[in-house]
Image (spheres, helix red, strand yellow):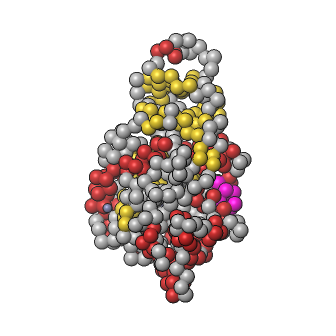
Amino acid sequence: MKTLISGGTVVNSTGTATADVLIDGEKIVALVSPGSDVWGSDLERSVDTVIDATGKYVIPGGIDAHTHMQLPFGGTHASDTFETGTIAAAWGGTTSIIDFAVQRTGERVEDGLAHWHELAAGNCAVDYGFHQIIGGVDELSLKAMETLVDEGITSYKLFMAYPGVFYSDDAQILRAMQKAADLGLLTMMHAENGPAIDVLAEQLHQQGRTDPYFHGIARAWQMEEEATHRAIMLADLTGAPLYVVHVSAKQAVEQLAWARDRGKNVFGETCPQYLYLSLEEQLAATSDQWGAFEGAKWVCSTPLRSKEEGHLDAMWQALRTNDLQMVSTDHCPFCMKDQKELGAGDFRAIPNGIGSIEHRMDLMYQGVVTGKITLERWVELTSTTPARMFGLHGQKGVLQPGADGDVVVYDPNGHTSIGFGEGKTHHMNMDHSAWEGFEIDGKVDTVLSRGCVLIRDDEYLGSKTHGRFLKRGLSQYLV
Ligand code: DUC
Ligand code: ZN
Ligand code: ZN
Ligand code: ZN
């Protein structure tokens, strides 16, 4: 099966050119410049399918390196299954995800990982890999880390937050990082001072400050800055490269920049919610339907930050200056009904998370439209760097011969109305959208994964048995 994507503007992280993309089977086999006679004029006739991309961008499929399908959290599970979440990903131009396999405190790493494989296998519309959450660093889990690289799981995550659930203390972090440095595993860190946050949250609760808004007050930026610095120093001591997830505070970015300026192997991602949504808007949010509890839609950790204090601008700036290298979603959806509602009257019991997997490519493209990032940087932040960071380079994240035929045709003249209501685009398994009312000057037009068309003419043509487990190599950023 040969597919030709013709007449489009091919955008890689390294540059932009008018070219046709030829896919044979699952792989890209050639990029053909217009007027080139290498292939003769018969090319279009010798392929099975021609997709006309004239006037559109042709980009490598998005890679969302931070998702939580079915995550057990706060007495419930994230509401997207691997099936619903990866279909939503496909609609949004994301053709690979890296989800977090969970070892819960008290559980064996091997059992947590096996459970994750069971949940995902045969249920993914797009390709998927795993990071491993280590929820309890002890002799057994340190031993289990030794087999991860062979299993294609070359990164793992620790939590400095959530005491009693996923939390690691400094001694545990140090030991895990020593092990990771030996093995070549990339350490991903949820950098917030959990024990101190829990004290602040309890104090707010006692004062009767129970609304969702106070979630963000308890999780003050000082908690993120301090933990980020501590993670950097522990990583530096052990020689482990460090990747800080969901960075939202400008002071945390300053820590990353400080470390990088000193040559430390430290990286960071931010998420669309920290670029577009603010604590002020969360405070202002009220509606007839949900009352003050409306703000629960935007309860996530790290929390939304103050726009007035400059956190949102600082995230955009860091994406331009490469103090932050990637944008992932931290896709962790919960419905309001029966899920977020668990925290009515007590913000501490609201399951943390926002669903954005479907909108990341659009929201970041809006950054191109508004002049905040370039076209090439859009591709780099959402696809090329994720591939390099997480051991998929050459296979994903780039349009070149030999790479997988994961291609998105993006229409800059199209329009996307994000949200839950009628005429809106919403395929995630949620009863609301944190992104209601966002309008994008662009649209995902056609999506291919390994040469198979998943989305075309506003129709999903994929299957839940298409997505394959990605056995990842080591990060290209280890040295
Ligand atoms: N943050 C979230 O918002 N949800 C799940 C876990 C996390 O760290
Ligand atoms: Zn479960
Ligand atoms: Zn986290
Ligand atoms: Zn997360």
The part of the image, by quadrant, that contains residue 18 is top right
Magenta segment, which residues?
Answer: 313-319
* Near-viewer residue (378 or 201): 201
Q: Is residue 7 left or right of residue 390?
A: right
Question: Which residue lies at the image location 61% right of the left edge and 57% below the top edge?
Answer: 324
Question: Which residue lies at the image location 52% right of the left edge and 68% below the top edge?
Answer: 290
Q: Could you say where residue 344 lies in the image, as x and y percent from the top left? A: 47, 74
Q: Could you say where residue 269 lies in the image, as x and y percent from the top left? A: 56, 57
Q: Is residue 381 something that shows in the picture?
A: no
Most common SS among magenta residues: helix
Residue 468 on the magenta segment: no
Quick check: 376 above or below 117? above
Q: Is residue 277 left or right of residue 459?
A: right
* Near-viewer residue (476 or 18): 18
Q: Is residue 297 left or right of residue 2?
A: right
Question: Which residue lies at the image location 47% right of the left edge and 78% below the top edge?
Answer: 346
* Near-viewer residue (413 or 181): 413
The part of the image, by quadrant, that contains residue 216 is bottom right
Q: Could you say where residue 3 lies in the image, as x and y percent from the top left? A: 47, 24
Residue found at the far top of this picture: 41
